[in-house]
Amino acid sequence: MGQLDGSQLHWVLVHGSMHGAWSYYKTMALLQAEGYKVTAVDLAGCGASAVDSNTVSDFEVFNQPLVDVLNAVPATERVVLVGHSLGSISLLHAMENFTHKISLAIHVAGALLPSGVSFEITGDYYKGCFPEIGPFQIFARQIFGNGPENPPTTITIDKANLQKVFYTSPKTPSADLALAQIMCRPASFEVQFSTVVHYTKEKQGTIPSVYIKTSIDQTLPPASQDYIIKACPQTEVVEIQADHTPMFCATDELHEILLRLAAKYTNALTKAI
């Protein structure tokens, strides 16, 4: 692949559970200031999506907004995919189905899954990732949108407890915490715990894949991330001093890492490198 300038790289940002495109507002602004094209996706039932998350029980429906974005990417652009937390599952699906369009995949505190495995609460993989009860398990609340006699439809963290789960770093600006308290939405229970993505080493192996490990994360603790990285090997692992949402508590550091990775793996020219 020849050398690319900033205008030919298209950053596609995929949010994590209970979040939306809004969670990348700082990262998006910084990348745009470098001259890049950037798209932050709202998956179905998330962020500004008009879909009620209680009605989303299928990963294909949940992930369709990302599929639509990638289908629309012209042949002249090469995609850098960034997935936060559970957004990594969407990246795995995209890497399998849009291999020819993707130059680099970056997982930020990624909740990666081996092919054919889900995060089912009673499953071995979930137990391996979360051997101890943490803030998410303590404060997560199930919502029964179809009545208490039926399985839960969504899972949420009440506004008063969001800081204790996702934004534990003292470096998180109070304005960003307030934004999250306004914008976070319940996440589809089925998508979060029952999604299974099937993928092949042949296709995944053609795309450089980098894991950004968040070293003071309490939602997905470093030991859990190590377990995930071992189960889903990456091209490279980079560590950042951040909680589960480095786009808020370590905005500049995350931006510098993203630029460095783009330069390393896509030969992109940026004025910051």
Image (spheres, rainbow, N blue to C red):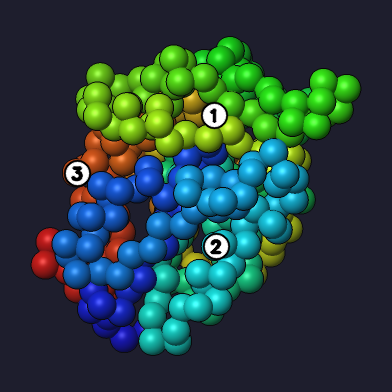
- Residue visible at 38% across and 46% down in the picture: 22
Q: Is residue 9 left or right of residue 31?
A: right
Among numbered discs 1 and 3, the one appearing first in the sequence: 1
- Residue visible at 54% across and 62% down in the picture: 66
| Residue 203 % position (x, y) | 62, 70
Residue kind at label 1, given as amino acid type: Ser
Secondary structure at badge 1 equals helix
| Residue 249 % position (x, y) | 27, 32
Residue reaching furthest right?
Answer: 149
Q: Is residue 198 left or right of residue 83?
A: right
Secondary structure at badge 2 equals helix
Q: Nearer the viewer, mark 1 or mark 3?
A: 3
CB of mark 1 within 8 Å of CB of mark 2? Answer: no
Among numbered discs 1 and 2, the one appearing first in the sequence: 2
- Of residue 252 and residue 145, the one placed in the foreground of this image is 145
Q: Which mark is residue 66?
A: 2
> Is 244 above or below relative to 94?
above
Residue 44 seen by the camera = yes
The Cα atoms of the two marked residues, 1 and 3, are separated by 25 Å
- Of residue 115 and residue 248, the one placed in the foreground of this image is 248
Question: Residue 109 falls in which quadrant of the image?
Answer: top left
The quadrant of the picture occupied by the C terminus is bottom left
Residue kind at label 3, given as amino acid type: Asp
Residue kind at label 2, given as amino acid type: Leu
- Of residue 246 and residue 26, the one placed in the foreground of this image is 26
| Residue 40 % position (x, y) | 40, 57
The quadrant of the picture occupied by the N terminus is bottom left
Q: Nearer the viewer, mark 2 or mark 3?
A: 2
Residue that badge 1 annotates: 224
Binning the other alpha carbons within 10 Å of mark 3 as few (below 14), some (14 to 19) or many (20 upward) gives some
